[in-house]
Image (tube, helix red, strand yellow):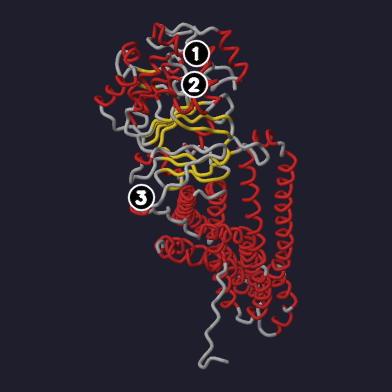
Amino acid sequence: MKANGPTAPRPRRDTALRRVAREARPFLRARTGAVLRLAGWSLLEFAQTFLSGYGVARALDDGFLASRPATGLCWLAVAAVAVLPSVLAARGVFGRLADLVEPLRDGLVRRAVSRALGGALGRSGDVSTRSLSQVTHQSEIARDGWAGLVLTLRSFAFTAAGAVTGLLALAPALLLIVLPPLAVGAALFLATLPPMAARQRAYLAADEAYAAHAGELAASVRDIAAAGTAGRTVAESGALAEAQLAASRSLARWSAVRVLALAVCGRFPPLLLLLAAPWLLRNGLTAGALVGALTYLTQALAPAVQALMTMLGTAGGRLVVVLDRFTNAPPPPEDDPPQAVRDSAPPPADRTAHPAVPAPAPSARRAPAPVAELHEVTFAYGPRAQPVLDRLSLTIAPGEHLAVVGPSGSGKSTLAAVLAGVEPPTGGAVRWRGRPVRAADATSVRVLLPQHAYVFSGSLRDNLRYLSPDARDREIADAAEAIGLEPLLSRLGSLDADVVPDRLSQGERQLVALGRAYLAAPPLLILDEATSRLDPAAETRAELACAALPGALVVVAHRLSSARRAGRTLVMDGPRTRCGTPAQLLRSSALYRDLAGLWEPEDADARGGGLVPDARDAAAVAGRLGTVGTGQDASIGSGDEDEERGVRSSPPPSPV
């Protein structure tokens, strides 16, 4: 059944050119003054074009052919002098060109950066490599293409206007010979624009895909080698390279069609004018007008048309495609869910695959969301590698103190990196305060201290305030006292004393990093063997100070005393995990009992004065378990202590 009334018009297809035109109109309206100033300077080029052909025609008809050579020379002088103002016009044009070109590039860079930030908040895939290509490569293509297009369009418009005005002044019949081949060539040229734009778009997409692939390879070389996927990676790279080559060849084939259009526009008008010359001369055209028309065609109009078509066919098509990739505004950051929704949502099941990690007691549950959650998290270093974390679920409440222990290579540092948002999980979800991990939240939610502390050249005050630039001296002094920085502060003399990192022991560097984290007091503090170079007394003092902060504390422990100070301990042995209190783990975890057997001599020696444990006993237990953590018992509390600096530092652990 047909509906009565007029049929609704079909909506126009939203092409790249239309999208770019919608964005271009407000951009140009905002810079009307710059466009008018550019046009004003270009009027000099119009005058130069008009006088070049008209002066030659008058020199022949009114001068040399009329036996008045002086008049002819004067007209030629006028045509020659007309070139001088065009030189001045070029200087003024380039000065005004920057008012149109630089704002475009700045706007594109802002859009690319905004897209990258929005994509990072949304945790999208390849937005970083795409935005890098847009900032460094595509924005420069757009700037150069836009500058060339403005110059070429301006030159063509005023040159063509001067030439057409001159032809009308000489003989209107000349336009009947000149305009038809120009119209045919222009139509043929315009017909190639859509397929050329599509081929250009395909080429840029292939270029971005290859750039994204290369960026992933650069960050995953070790994973590729470890997983044995070099052959597959080479095949993927070859396929992307072939796609880029095919796109460039298709683009080149359509460029060949442009050559025909350029020939019709640039070569046919002078040829037709020469063929029609006898007819034109019989119908009253003077010889001077014929030579003047040839001057317009060969010296002004044909070069301007060829330059315009070349620009539109190469940089113009590329410009439209590149600008179209910037037209879509980046998505705004995802709003946080309302507090009531987050509070009412039931917490995910807190378990691991082998076996379950018990959640805190029901009495410890509270309305605020956990500071960090792992839900069915899996992580592997490569698609074929064995998972280091296998469907691990864990909940960390605000103010909780959790220790992580296990042999070397069991995944403790990997867990710390995933929990801190440094490494994205292969599967599952990581949440901070009830919402997915976002890079924008990192500095406000967590602080991760690795084993090798970062200390930079500068004052001690600047090093401690690195994460809290607004901290007052009283707060810095309290942090130094709590962490145990008084010996280092006394040795340096004051907070304003210069710190030379190479002159600090590893233990002193760790104390500076701990003081920095204590001063920041983040909701989640993760110590990945960040106290491994401290003696047991200094480690105890620093950990107790960090545990007294209102936020949660996660300690990747290298001494059993760290685990005993924690409310819960997570024992890791690769994908097998067990969590509980020390008393529970002594009953339920054979690995924890073995670790306790390894660490007990060190703890006993710490209570007895820090004597080195018997290396044979440690070696015997280590032979059963392998290296424990990165702070092996054989190296804990051994020599190489910086007594003169007030901090004892154990030697570096064996490589893992």
Q: Secondary structure at mark 2?
A: loop
Mark 3 vs mark 1: which is more N-terminal?
3
User: In the rendered view, does 454 fall on the left or right side of 239?
Assistant: left
Which residue does the numbered mark 3 point to in the structure image? Answer: 343
Q: Amino acid at mark 3?
A: Asp
Q: Amino acid at mark 1?
A: Ile
Height in image: 578 above or below 256? above
Question: Which quadrant is home to the C terminus?
Answer: top right
Which residue does the numbered mark 2 point to in the structure image? Answer: 558
Q: Quick check: marks 3 and 1 in contact, CB under 8 Å?
A: no
Q: Which quadrant of the figure has residue 385?
A: top right
Question: Which quadrant is home to the N terminus?
Answer: bottom right
Which residue does the numbered mark 1 point to in the structure image? Answer: 636
Task: Estimate the spatial distance between the alpha carbons at disc 3 and disc 1, rounded to whole Å.
Answer: 44 Å
Q: Position of residue 51 (x, y in %)?
A: 55, 67
Task: Estimate the spatial distance between the alpha carbons at disc 1 and disc 2, rounded to whole Å.
Answer: 9 Å
Q: Which quadrant of the figure has residue 373?
A: top left
Task: Estimate the spatial distance between the alpha carbons at disc 3 and disc 2, rounded to whole Å.
Answer: 36 Å
Q: Label 3: how many residues lie within 10 Å, few (<14), some (14-19) or many (20+)?
A: some
Q: Amino acid at mark 2?
A: His
Q: Position of residue 522 (x, y in %)?
A: 36, 34
Mark 1 vs mark 2: which is more N-terminal?
2
Comparing 81 with 631, the one in front is 631
Q: Position of residue 600 (x, y in %)?
A: 48, 14
Mark 3 vs mark 2: which is more N-terminal?
3
